[in-house]
């Protein structure tokens, strides 16, 4: 399994079904991501979870714009592509552990 595939699957999976406690239980942190942008997205999703915000593609994009300003990095199309290319959440812990041990 390629690390970037696992990284995209974790973020995409969280945008589809925000099972953040399952992923956090693996010990995954943003610095484990080889793709800095995906690591930042992970941090944003964790912050949204802590603030008890609803998480999906649109709410995530809007939250990032509100908290850190408009960004060309976290567009709706970018976040949607992560969700579209996600392998699913059934094995999200496996993907998170893969990122940690790469």
Image (tube, helix red, strand yellow):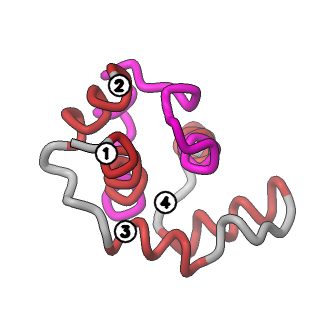
Mark 1 element type: helix
Residue under label 2: 102
Q: Nearer the viewer, residue 15 or 9?
A: 9
In the rendered image, the residue lying farthest to the right is 69
> Marks 3 and 2: CB-CB under 8 Å?
no
Could you tell me residue 6's position as x and y percent? 31, 45
Q: Quadrant of residue 71?
A: bottom right
Q: Nearer the viewer, residue 38 or 35?
A: 35
Mark 2 element type: loop
| Foreground disc of the pair 4, 2 | 2
Q: Which residues are magenta?
A: 14-42
> Marks 1 and 3: CB-CB under 8 Å?
no
> Marks 1 and 4: CB-CB under 8 Å?
no
Q: Residue at x 42, y 25 (%)?
A: 28
What's the distance in space between the residues labelled 1 and 2, CA to CA? 10 Å
Q: Residue at x 42, y 66 (%)?
A: 82
Can you tell which mark lies on residue 83?
Answer: 3
Could you tell me residue 2's position as x and y percent? 29, 44
What's the distance in space between the residues labelled 4 and 2, CA to CA? 27 Å
Residue under label 1: 6
Q: Quadrant of the C terminus?
A: top left
> Marks 1 and 2: CB-CB under 8 Å?
yes
Is residue 7 shown left or right of residue 86?
right
Mark with earlier residue (1, 3): 1
Mark with earlier residue (4, 2): 4
What's the distance in space between the residues labelled 3 and 2, CA to CA? 22 Å
Whether residue 67 is situated above or below residue 31 in the rendered picture: below
Q: Residue at x 42, y 52 (%)?
A: 11
Q: Quadrant of the N terminus?
A: top left
Name the main secondary structure of what is drawn in magenta.
helix
Mark with earlier residue (1, 2): 1
Whether residue 37 is situated above or below residue 34 in the rendered picture: below
């Amino acid at each position: 399994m390629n690390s970037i595939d696992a990284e995209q699957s974790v973020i995409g999976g969280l945008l589809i079904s925000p099972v953040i406690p399952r992923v956090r239980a693996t010990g995954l942190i943003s610095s484990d991501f080889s793709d800095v942008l995906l690591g930042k997205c992970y941090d944003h999703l964790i912050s949204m979870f802590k603030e008890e915000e609803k998480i999906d593609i649109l709410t995530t994009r809007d939250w990032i714009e509100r908290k850190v300003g408009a960004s060309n990095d976290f567009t709706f199309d970018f976040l949607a592509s992560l969700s579209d290319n996600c392998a699913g959440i059934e094995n999200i812990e496996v993907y998170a552990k893969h990122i940690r041990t790469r």
